[in-house]
Amino acid sequence: MKRTILLLGLLLTTAAAAAQPRIRVEHGPYLLNVTDEGFTVVWSSTADAAGWVELAPDDGSHFYAAERPKFRDSHLGRQRIGRMHSVRVSGLKPGTTYRYRIMQRGVVLNEGNKRVILDEGFGSDILKHKPYTVTTLDPAQEKVDFWVVNDIHSRDSVFRLLIRSAPKEKPDFVCLNGDLATQIETPETLWDACLASASEILTPAGIPLAAVRGNHENRGVYSGCWSDFFPTPTGETYYTFRRGPVFFLVLDGCEDKPDSDIEYYGLSDFDRYRADQVAWLKETVASEAFRTAPFKVAIIHVPPVNSTWHGPLDVKKHFLPVLNDAGIDLMLCGHLHSYHYLPAGQTECDFPVLINSNDRAVEVEATADALNLKVKDTKKQVVQELTLKAKQ
């Protein structure tokens, strides 16, 4: 009798599994955190799944020519199950191009440790399409080109106009400097805002993203998902990275109103989060990696100037004393939806501040000698050019 019940349970479970639709890639992938030894891939699936990335050298062989190493979406030794997938691929050679594909197996039935039944594995189609490629950083890289856009606020059509030429011009990365959406209400919000387009346009060209949290990413019932979409080396929304001659310092200005504002329903603690960044910031700017970089660029959504609201004033209070002594060469901001270029010393900042509008892209070429900036509109017309020379 017991055997019959077990067999019946197995048949019912198998039937349930067979009745489920096959799991597919829903959105993505896109690249993050590319270093000289690895990179991160993010995507979503149509239902709960276990995901992984398969890696192959860019040597002309077919992807199916050999068993390819698998890097799994796991934590503490267990594969994570869900619709969002983030995989870190590591242990690679610097300055080397690799091919990769994303894969997943849908979890049809999961009752703790009792049973986990998986459907077939599906992911990147490498029979009809070429595998994705990514190139790890070369520590000897002498020049870096990067683009910055901000305040998209779910205007995906504007975003596409600003980045449409990236596959041809091939910037090293595209920075999303906050307020991709007005508020994050569902898991689909950020995909619809611009990430689906970023995946479509940038990923096939091997162009990664760098993301900065804006104030509006703190709003909405799904706002806590930010780190699912944009994991960072620090595990926080503030972090650093180096590309060519530039040391990038990413800061989080948080919200623009007092924590007590009715818009935050009494659930905000942004004053503390800004204050907590200061110790990390002081340690960072004292590091040899920061001090020896030819250029230091700070990126933050909320500018410390040109506003008398609480958030910008708190950014000024906490960050400016450290940054003014750190030899920052340029700060890139958004938030105001209007364009301002403020030379060093024109405000309380001892460095130039560029506040980009919500319908332009800042395209930067950095060499050991200069930062060359072009601000372009949606027609790709240059509306301003700037050159910032290296300090002697």
Image: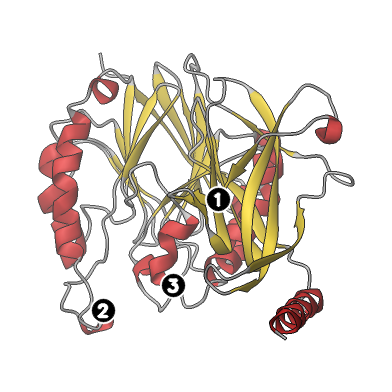
Instruction: Name which residue lies at 28% across and 17% down.
Output: 292
Q: Kindly identify the amino acid type of the residue bearing the numbered disc 1.
A: Asp
Q: Kindly identify the amino acid type of the residue bearing the numbered disc 2.
A: Tyr
Q: How far separated are the C-alphas under marks 3 and 1? A: 29 Å
Mark 2, Cα crowd under 10 Å, few <14 / some 14-19 / many 20+, is: some
Q: Could you tell me which secondary element the residue under label 1 belongs to?
A: loop
Where does residue 17 sit, x and y in percent of width and height?
76, 74
Using residue 268 as the reference point, say whether residue 382 is left or right of it: right
- Tell me the quadrant of the picture where the C terminus can be found: top left
Which residue is the site of mark 2?
264
Sequence-wise, which precedes: disc 2 or disc 3?
3
Using residue 284 as the reference point, say whether residue 192 is left or right of it: right
Which residue is the site of mark 1?
73
- Tell me the quadrant of the picture where the N terminus can be found: bottom right
The reply to whether residue 77 is visible in this rendering is yes
Which residue is the site of mark 3?
182
Say which of 289 and 14 sits in front.
14
Say which of 282 and 370 sits in front.
282
Q: Kindly identify the amino acid type of the residue bearing the numbered disc 3.
A: Thr
Q: How far separated are the C-alphas under marks 2 and 1? A: 33 Å
The reply to whether residue 46 is visible in this rendering is no
Q: Nearer the viewer, mark 2 or mark 3?
A: 2
Q: How far separated are the C-alphas under marks 2 and 3? A: 14 Å
Say which of 96 and 115 sits in front.
115
Mark 3, Cα crowd under 10 Å, few <14 / some 14-19 / many 20+, is: many
Q: Could you tell me which secondary element the residue under label 2 belongs to?
A: helix
